[in-house]
Image (spheres, rainbow, N blue to C red):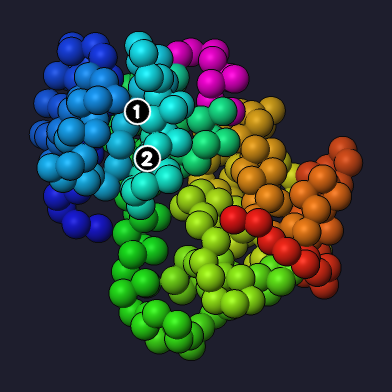
Amino acid sequence: MPTTAGVMIVDDDPEVRTMLREYLSSHGFAVTDAESGQAMRAALERAVPDVVLLDIGLPGEDGLALARYLRERYDLGIIMVTGAGDVVDRVVGLEVGADDYITKPFDPRELRARVRSVLRRLHARAERETARTPGTPSARGGRRKAVGACLLDLDTHQLLRSDGEEIPLTSMEFELLQIFVERPNQVLTRDRLLTLTRNREWEPFDRSIDIRVARLRKKVEADPEKPLLIRTVRGAGYMFVPGATARRPGG
């Protein structure tokens, strides 16, 4: 991972921005900050960071709307900052494509660890994509796993339709899908999935896994309401069934 990674802090509290800017800068990050969505857009025109730390509770255009804007236009990491106990906000944040979240008040060291975790996933994917020529198999032989009518390329971190078109995945969605395809026909509990995705600090009853599974189903299942590939095992968890087929995966 590069020694200087870019982090943008989007928060309307100047004290929070100053504290995080000084802390992250002291640990080798190139930090910019913005107090609003308008200021964030202006900063993005000057330079696109690797990760955006985005407060949900912004006045006016809130963090959820901005997360959706970022996910639609930029290939970067998004960490949502929510108030303690705001489960609904966390769930919606994950639904719009955030890679991770952290709740206030938080220890800056935990935030730094989460930023580095997101950066590792993003940079691993970027490095693998540079080894691949567009439209051809991976230079490493194309470790690809069938996911219904799609192919998951484990080298480039891409989910591809049969016509070669890429279906966008967040880094956490890729990680979860990789766990499924590498453990076919195995029942995986939510607790096990949290452990395997290196997010064991989340509570076992946290809906983050369910939200990500629902997002994956929309991308690979013919009918997300009647999933054949990623099945729910009542009272246990989820199971990936590679022999099932999906006709028209969504993007």
Report which residue position mark 2 lands on.
70
Q: Which residue sits at x=21%, y=40%?
A: 44
Q: Earlier in the sequence, mark 1 or mark 2?
A: 1
Task: Specify whether 228 is left or right of 49.
Answer: right
| Quarter holding residue 161 | bottom right
The kind of secondary structure element at disc 2 is helix
Q: Are marks 1 and 2 in contact (CB under 8 Å)?
A: yes
The kind of secondary structure element at disc 1 is strand
Looking at this view, is 17 or 23 the one in front?
A: 17
Report which residue position mark 1 lands on.
54
Indicate whether residue 184 is drawn in magenta.
Answer: no
| Label 1 crowd (10 A; few <14 / some 14-19 / many >=20) | many
Tell me which segment is drawn in magenta. 83-91
Label 1 sits on what residue type?
A: Leu
Label 2 sits on what residue type?
A: Leu
Position of residue 27 relative to residue 167, above or below, is above
Quadrant location of the C terminus in the rendered image = bottom right
Q: Position of residue 155 (x, y in %)?
A: 46, 74
Is label 1 or label 2 in front? 2
Task: Specify whether 234 is left or right of 155.
Answer: right
Position of residue 218 relative to residue 140, above or below, is above
Q: Position of residue 247 (x, y in %)?
A: 77, 67
Q: Which residue sits at x=75%, y=57%?
A: 221
Looking at this view, is 88 or 43 the one in front?
A: 43
Q: Position of residue 68 (x, y in %)?
A: 45, 36
Task: Specify whether 210 is left or right of 82.
Answer: right
